[in-house]
Image (cartoon, rainbow, N blue to C red):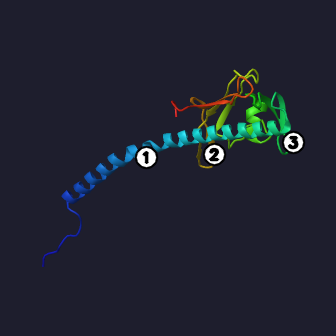
Amino acid sequence: MKRQEAGFTLIELVVVIIILGILAAVALPKFMGLSTDARVSVVNGMSGSVNEAADMVHALAEVQGTVSGGTVTLPGGTTVTIDNGYPDSSATGILLALQGGSTTVSAAFPFTFVAGTGKPATSVATFEYTATSTTDGTTTTGTPNTTCTVTYTPPASSGDEPTIGEDLAGC
């Protein structure tokens, strides 16, 4: 009686390996770009948050009659320094408006804040994206990326709007 062997032939195994190699070559570049897209999305979200915080402070400055300068009091009692009706570029300006009353950047905040000098309006506040990774329950924070940033420049004169820029070159 002849015994029949069960299993795959060498040719079948080679064909499967070739198919898997082709699929990996096609799919890998797609997944490689996802981390860049994620960083760009985070920077775009930060830009929108900066814009909304500036608009909120401007609306409060209009209501409180302090558009010409000084401070604006946010709900909850936080005082934000303003420049031509919008937050200035200091830690007590745009950062305070974003953080909702805290000038301490929390661990969940993926940006390093580089404050401008406040006034005049030509000083620029910069938010540098900082990548964090979590492995085995420990969080590692990388160095700030100075070419993946959001910048905020208060208006130069009353009636103007602040300038919010994005640098996505290093994302």
Quarter location, residue 82:
top right
Q: Secondary structure at mark 1?
A: helix
Quarter location, residue 151:
top right
Disc with the residue nearer the chain's start (3 vs 2): 3
From the image, tell me which residue sits under label 1.
Answer: 31
**Which quadrant does the N terminus fall into?**
bottom left
> Which tag is nearer the camera, tag 2 or tag 1?
1
Horizontal placement of 31 versus 82: left or right?
Answer: left
Residue visible at 79% across and 31% down?
A: 92
- Type of amino acid at the residue the image marks with label 2: Thr
Q: Residues within 10 Å of mark 3 (few under 14, many from 20)?
A: few
Q: Residues within 10 Å of mark 2 (few under 14, many from 20)?
A: few
From the image, tell me which residue sits under label 3.
Answer: 77
Horizontal placement of 94 versus 48: left or right?
Answer: right
- Type of amino acid at the residue the image marks with label 1: Phe
Residue visible at 62% across and 40% down?
A: 140
Considering every residue shown, the one lying at the far right of the view is 77
Disc with the residue nearer the chain's start (2 vs 1): 1
